[in-house]
Amino acid sequence: MHSTPRFLQGVYEFTGAGLDKPALLDPALAYTVPAGVTTQPIYFRGGNATDELVTIVLVRDGAPMRLFPVGAKADTHVSLAVVEDLEMGTVLELHVAAPAGLTGTVVVDLGLVEV
């Protein structure tokens, strides 16, 4: 079976709107499952350079799918291997939820595989 890795990754600045108001980090952090394949999330890694807890929210078709809390000046690694299949047309985005007015930088790396 042929598979193709895909990654949503980078270093991004943000301004928090509130822990209950996640916002898209960057338009580059959106992925749509192409026609003819199924995509599986494999892992999430994230780092937080601020002095406050932030949460990276994996959004699926406009609704939160997974929450990844990242502590103050900390990092996290979550294995997602073979958790679920995402069918063609599914849209994934990485959002950040942070205390209102908090500015800072996060590092995100979401690994996916198309099969």
Image: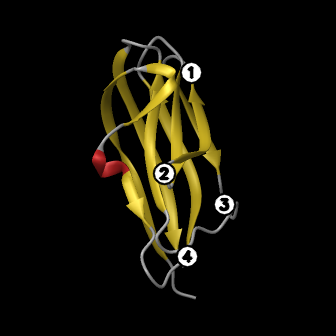
Residue 100 location, quadrant: top left
Gap in angstroms between the C-alphas marked 1 and 3: 23 Å
What x and y, as percent, mark residue 30?
A: 37, 54
Q: Which amino acid type is marked by label 2?
A: Leu
Which residue is at 31% across, 34% downward?
12
Between residue 42 and residue 14, name the one nearer to us.
14
Circle 2 SS class: strand
Q: Marks 3 and 4: which is nearer the front?
A: 4
Packing grade of label 3 (10 A; few <14, some 14-19, many >=20) is: some
Element class at badge 3: loop
Q: Quadrant of the N terminus?
A: bottom right
- What residue would you read off at disc 3? 81
Q: Amino acid at mark 3?
A: Ala
Q: Earlier in the sequence, mark 3 or mark 4?
A: 4
Image mark for residue 30: none
Quadrant of the image occupied by residue 7:
bottom left
Q: Mark 4, residues whose alpha carbon is within 10 Å: few (<14), some, or many (≥20)?
A: some
Are discs 1 and 2 less than 8 Å apart at CB?
no
Left or right: 1, with 62 as reference point:
right
Q: Which residue lies at the image location 69% right of the left edge and 64% below the top edge?
A: 82
Cα distance between the residues tagged 3 and 4? 14 Å
C-alpha separation, residue under disc 4 versus residue under disc 2: 16 Å
The residues bearing labels 3 and 2 have C-alpha atoms spaced at a distance of 12 Å
**Of the residues shown, which amino acid type is indicated by label 1?**
Gly
Relative height, residue 63 to residue 3 (above, below): above
Give the mark, 4 or 2, whose residue is nearer the N terminus: 4
